[in-house]
Image (spheres, rainbow, N blue to C red):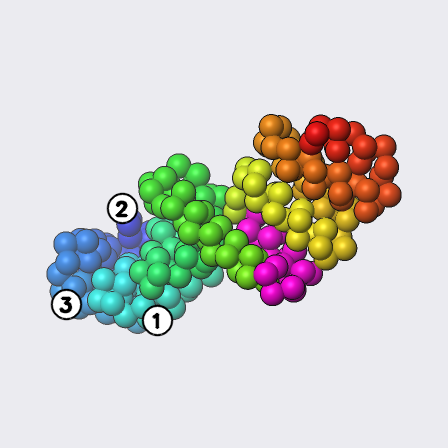
């Protein structure tokens, strides 16, 4: 990653910035801290200076300080790619899949081809979807149908192409009495998995419960 010194720095300070960032990249962290210290006092609100400090603290393992520096940078420049990258890596380093996924989505909106997006997006989607799905299933098994239906919606946010997940969501919504939403999700399940008889059965049940008798008859016919 390349960080360019901000234009408002004097030529001497730009040289200090370049030295500091190079030392961060090369792992000479004490030297980097020395190079950046004066810049931080004078240009603490600069997105570039804050980002360089964020990566320094990240490499030092001081995650709260890294978070603060990246937040400072993003307040000044919300779409600044290096700061977004560091902010994501800070969440990833503590194993917080939900937060990592959220921050990677922010990075993706501005930089859809970013290497971090290409490397981590699929894995994080799977991890977050599995975590949310496990919670939804636990709620459903415990008879907390309304809460389970809401939890399934959360899982669908990160796995919108999974027909089986739409089917599970529809069953939870049917149990919660949300018949119109159950019919909608069951229909989406049949579109994604047109050979899944169970999806048509649940669609028929949801339509019947919603008073859509002709639609229910058609869905039951497809299931049969």
Residue 63 at what x, y percent from top left?
A: 31, 68
Left or right: 92 in relation to 60:
right
Residue depicted at 47% across the width and 56% down the height: 131
Is residue 198 in view?
A: yes
Say which residue label 3 marks: 30
Left or right: 155 in relation to 63:
right
Disc 3 packing (10 Å; few <14; some 14–19; many ≥20)? few
Disc 2 packing (10 Å; few <14; some 14–19; many ≥20)? few
Give the magenta range.
140-157
**Callout 3 touching callout 2 (CB < 8 Å):** no
Question: Mark number for residue 28?
Answer: none
Disc 1 packing (10 Å; few <14; some 14–19; many ≥20)? few
In the structure shown, which secondary structural element does the residue marked by tag 3 occupy? helix
Which sits earlier in the primary sequence, circle 1 or circle 3? Answer: 3
In the structure shown, which secondary structural element does the residue marked by tag 2 occupy? loop
Question: Mark number for residue 64?
Answer: 1
**Quick check: 76 above or below 179?**
below
> Nearer the observer, disc 1 or disc 3?
1
Q: Is residue 148 magenta?
A: yes
Is residue 70 in view?
A: no
The one nearer the camera, 150 or 172, is 172
Residue 123 at what x, y percent from top left?
A: 38, 46
Residue depicted at 76% across the width and 55% down the height: 177
State which quadrant residue 44 falls in: bottom left
Question: Mark number for residue 2?
Answer: 2
Which sits earlier in the primary sequence, circle 2 or circle 1? Answer: 2
Left or right: 106 in relation to 21:
right
In the structure shown, which secondary structural element does the residue marked by tag 1 occupy? helix
Residue depicted at 14% across the width and 67% down the height: 30
State which quadrant residue 31 falls in: bottom left
């Amino acid at each position: 990653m390349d960080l360019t010194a901000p234009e408002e720095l004097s030529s001497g300070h730009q040289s200090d910035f370049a030295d500091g960032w190079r030392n961060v990249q090369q792992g000479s962290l004490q030297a980097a801290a020395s190079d950046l210290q004066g810049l931080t006092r004078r240009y603490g609100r600069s997105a570039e200076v804050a980002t360089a400090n964020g990566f320094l603290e990240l490499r030092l393992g001081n995650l709260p300080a890294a978070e603060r520096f990246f937040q400072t940078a993003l307040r000044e420049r919300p779409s600044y790619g290096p700061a977004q990258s560091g902010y994501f890596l800070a969440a990833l380093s503590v194993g917080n899949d939900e937060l990592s996924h959220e921050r990677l989505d922010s990075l993706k909106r501005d930089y859809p081809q970013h290497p971090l997006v290409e490397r981590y997006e699929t894995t994080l989607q799977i991890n977050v979807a599995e975590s949310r799905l496990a919670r939804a299933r636990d709620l459903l098994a415990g008879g907390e149908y309304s809460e389970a239906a809401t939890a399934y919606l959360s899982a669908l946010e990160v796995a919108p192409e999974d027909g089986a997940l739409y089917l599970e969501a529809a069953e939870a919504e049917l149990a919660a009495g949300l018949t119109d939403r159950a019919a909608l999700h069951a229909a989406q399940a049949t579109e994604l998995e047109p050979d899944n008889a169970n999806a048509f059965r649940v669609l028929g049940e949801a339509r019947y419960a919603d008073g859509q008798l002709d639609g229910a008859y058609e869905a039951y016919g497809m299931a049969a």
